[in-house]
Amino acid sequence: MPSGTDTVEVDFVAPRQLAGGGDPAWVTVPLHRGCGWSYADDPLMPRVLLSSPDQKALLRLEPEPDGQWWTLQHAAEPGRPAWYASFGGRTPVELIAAVTDALTDPAATASAPSDPHEPLRQSGWMPASGCNALVSPDATANIEHTGTAQDPGAWFITATLGPNQPVWQARFGSRTPAHLISAFAAALTDPKPVPRPSRWSSLPTHDPDVITCQSADVPAVHFAGALEDRVRSLTARRATPATSPVPSQQPPAKNNPRR
């Protein structure tokens, strides 16, 4: 463990869609330790497989040079068909974590109405080419929904540095619960910079006209402790008992016998 005097140089990057992927442990460790997901270990393959406690959801992290690195699949349930989501390798882990946090939230309701466009509009995203497309104010990200009145359609969120210069893409199948896509959109529009250790900072661009990157020396214990804080928070959320009152188990009172 680092001592209290050790520091690590950290880059705080904004906008977060151009901060690079970050440490996958931000997603995988809390899922395993805080949410009870089990993992499969294959030392001969560079991949991670995590399964939900009910075995209905599977998260796969597998480097794909020409494809999506992260894939989240969920089996069909009564009243809800199977669905999937996938994310490119440079998708910031903070955005992926927003989806897995929403998925594992005991208080979340998948059937509740949710409009993924709403957090984007509130952050100044404007209509783009296409009937269901929005673009960020700095034009480095856009969202497209292929849905119609007859077909719910898929969602595509893309970070880009210009025409034909995509950085990453997130894809949500047509049956993905809307509140998960909304969680991703809300995390995407969060103006707070995301931290990246300088030695890991493989940013898609260092153009100061596009990104803001401020470096600072942060106590190593604080930087390492952020993941532990996240694990504790999800563990506590999972362990919180229901607040609904428990009906009394006492037997009903007997009537007095008539004399």
Image (tube, rainbow, N blue to C red):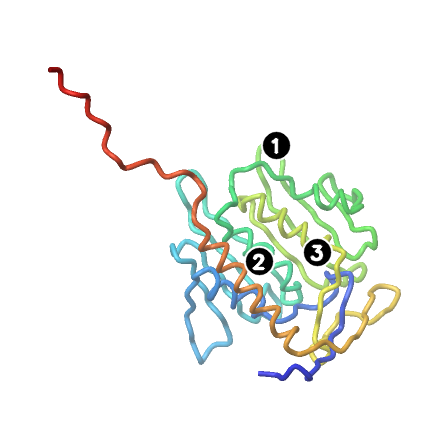
240 to the left or right of 93: left
Dot 1 falls on a residue whose secondary structure is loop
Q: Which mark is residue 62?
A: none
Work out whether mark 3 precedes mark 2 in sequence or the reverse, and give the earlier one.
2
Q: Residue furthest right?
A: 209
Work out whether mark 1 precedes mark 3 in sequence or the reverse, and give the earlier one.
1
Q: Amino acid at mark 1?
A: Ala
Front tag of 2 and 1: 2
For label 3, the crowd category at 10 Å Cα-Cα, with few meaning under 14, some 14 to 19 and many 20 or more, is many
Q: Quadrant of the C terminus?
A: top left
Q: Residue furthest top?
A: 259
Q: Which mark is residue 86?
A: 2
Q: Is residue 124 above or below residue 95?
A: above
Task: Please say if the residues under marks 3 and 2 sit with CB atoms less than 8 Å apart.
Answer: no
Question: Where is residue 95 shown, x and y percent of the image?
Answer: 64, 58
9 to the left or right of 42: right
Name which residue lies at 78% across and 44% down: 129
Dot 2 falls on a residue whose secondary structure is strand
How far is mark 1 from mark 3, CA to CA?
A: 24 Å
Q: Foreground residue, 21 or 145? A: 21
Q: Quadrant of the N terminus?
A: bottom right
Work out whether mark 2 precedes mark 1 in sequence or the reverse, and give the earlier one.
2
Q: Which residue is mark 3?
A: 158
Question: Where is residue 238 shown, x and y percent of the image?
Answer: 46, 55
Dot 3 falls on a residue whose secondary structure is strand
Q: Which residue is mark 1?
A: 149
Q: Is residue 246 above or below residue 196?
A: above
Q: Amino acid at mark 3?
A: Thr
Question: Where is residue 173 shown, x and y percent of the image?
Answer: 56, 49
Name which residue lies at 67% across and 54% down: 187
Name which residue lies at 74% across and 51% down: 142
Q: Amino acid at mark 2?
A: Ser
